[in-house]
Image: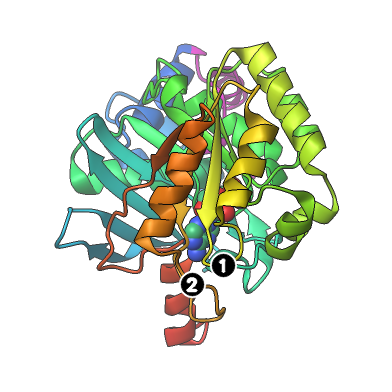
Amino acid sequence: MTDIKSMSMDELKSICIELGEKPFRGKQLYEWIHKKLVPDYDSMTNLPAGFREKLKEKEPLVCLEPIEIQRSAIDGTRKYLFRLSDGNVIESVWMQYHHGNSVCISSQVGCRMGCRFCASTIGGLVRSLSASEMLDQIYRIEADTKERVSNVVVMGTGEPLDNYENLLRFIRILSSPEGLNVSQRNITVSTCGIVPNIYRLAEEQLQITLALSLHAPNDEKRKELMPIAYRYSMDEILDACRNYFAKTGRRITFEYSLVGGKNDSEEDARELSQKIQDINCHVNLIPVNPIKERSYVKSGKKVIENFKNKLEKYGINVTIRREMGADIDGACGQLRKSFIDRTNGQ
Ligand code: SAH
């Protein structure tokens, strides 16, 4: 069994030939799946009926089932809980900004990176998502909102660079002109810092933005928040980022979740600035979103402002992430987690 929604155009053409059809059917099939976003073969009206029957029998079409949609009354943000064909659930978020609509997708069911403040990692990793399961989060959301998605961030549950091959397939299909044609410049991949795969990504000739979850000014503090810090040092990570910029010309985003009393002092800001000041980068400060399983708290408003000012004083570009959908299960992995808790995983 192949997963037809994860296939490139060339692979689809080969499948068509195997099924006794002309290669141009591959292009038609690709457009139905990735541009017109139809959920089933019956909707593909320009394909011969016999061919559609063969496809139905041989090539099941991955389609996620929305089982819960939460809508924020404050800013229109929507959180989706989707069921996968094996019964696992994942979540995605749709956000409206002035510059367009953005979707935040999951790359794995659960996560094995173990960041201390993150709800997605509490049950560990169940499995990685296929390219089709990543794509279909966006496709089902476009179908539901009836609006174009212009930005995609791979910042939901999971570590995308721990699912490298499928991530690459996903990016290539999502940005293909015969598909949704989302500009690679509007695709952001966020990683906790799997160094060898950052080097690999730099060689892929992509124009995507790399977001690096730093969250600390030194290895010692980073280890307290992120187990991955035992594996790769900050120096190694920052070198990988320098290389990424050198190879792609894409400015790096550093994500820094401010955790009250842990990584938010002026000294932390100073140390961070020194480490990254030679890198063409931008720092996105995220006030930590407390989860009930851990005792971490948000930094105060003033502390956040001070941290930002300090970084700016050292010449670093900084933004504070705007909180979206504060009235719905906001933080990473919380909707899935609360669903599993409510239903006891059934
Ligand atoms: N595995 C990827 C994607 C994770 S989610 C990564 O590590 O980058 C995207 C961002 O949200 C990461 O920077 C992550 O560390 C951060 N994050 C996760 N849970 C959070 C929380 N409760 N509060 C604030 N930031 C959080």
Q: Which residues are magenta?
A: 1-23
In this rendering, the label closer to the viewer, 2 or 1: 1
Disc 2 and disc 1 in contact, CB within 8 angstroms: yes
Residue with the mark numbered 1 = 261
What residue is shown at x 66% (from left), y 59% (from top)? 127
Amino acid carrying mark 2 in the image: Val
Residue furthest to the right in view is 231
- Image vertical order of residue 238 relative to residue 11, above or below: below
Residue 145, percent across and down? 20, 46
Residue 94, percent across and down? 30, 48
Q: Is residue 128 visible?
A: yes
Amino acid carrying mark 1 in the image: Gly
Residue 91, percent across and down? 43, 59
SS of the residue at dot 2? Answer: loop
**What quarter of the picture does the N terminus occupy?**
top right
Q: Residues within 10 Å of mark 1 (few under 14, many from 20)?
A: few
- Residue 240 vs residue 259: left or right? right
SS of the residue at dot 1? Answer: loop
What residue is shown at x 32% (from left), y 48% (from top)? 322
